[in-house]
Amino acid sequence: MNANRTAIKDTLGLAAARLAGKGLLKPGDTLSQRIPEQNAIILTRITAGQDVPEEFTWLSLTGPVSNFHQVIYGARPDVGAIAAGQFTWTNRLARLDLSLPPIFDEQIRQLGVEGRRVARRSNELGAFPALQNGANGYCLDDLSICLGMGLERLLLNIEILEKSAQSFVLAASSGLKVRRIPWLIKYIANGRLKKDQQDAAARHLRGERSILKAGY
């Protein structure tokens, strides 16, 4: 068990370093992963001056809720990894009090039909009804969150989220009209995401890791 936990920490630490190195996560931001075979989550915080974080926290998925990440995992069995923090472009949506509309097909395929602006703070540990729309990106009052069915998927999702938010914020700020994805493409892309989420949730509930799906 100790050797397994060491390997899990190493994997999460390298993921944190990768996201910090790209500027996607900043000091104080947090990254976590569901470990379904142990009915637990592991969480780390990005720290200044370190490529790989040294401190990791293990939390039970069935114990008392003391962290915002636990709220999300409890509400969304499909979620296998979470990044939360001061994302450069997604946080600007919160300052503009805007949700991220569906503007790219890959965005809808992996993040859902809307990156919703939600009026709540991350220190609120009560029910989070907005999560039930199945999206993988949200803008809160104090930070943004990106979700993935697994750690590998999260690493890709946060890049999609930030690129989509950047495109929308720049276009909206310039006064340009932002065109939306046709409803049929949105329907197909979101339907495939929901199918993947159902599979991930079933695996997690069986104590298994989700599988990264290749292709569109």
Image: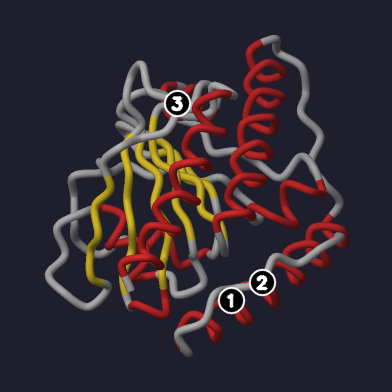
Lower position in the chain sequence, tag 3 or tag 1: 3
- Describe the element under mark 3 as helix, strand or loop: loop
Q: Residue type at mark 2: give it.
A: Ile
- Describe the element under mark 1 as helix, strand or loop: helix
Residue 200 is marked as 1
Quadrant of res 163: top right
Quadrant of res 205: bottom left
Lower position in the chain sequence, tag 1 or tag 2: 1
Which residue is under mark 2? 211
- Mark 2: few, some, or many residues within 10 Å (few <14, many ≥20)? some
| Near-viewer residue (180 or 84) | 84
Whether residues under marks 3 and 2 lie with C-beta atoms below 8 angstroms apart, the answer is: no
Q: Residue type at mark 3: give it.
A: Asp
The C terminus: image quadrant = bottom right
x then y, percent, for residue 67: 21, 54
- Disc number lying in front (3 or 2): 3
Q: Residue at x 36, y 70 (%)?
A: 75
- The vertical placement of 161 against 165, above or below, is below
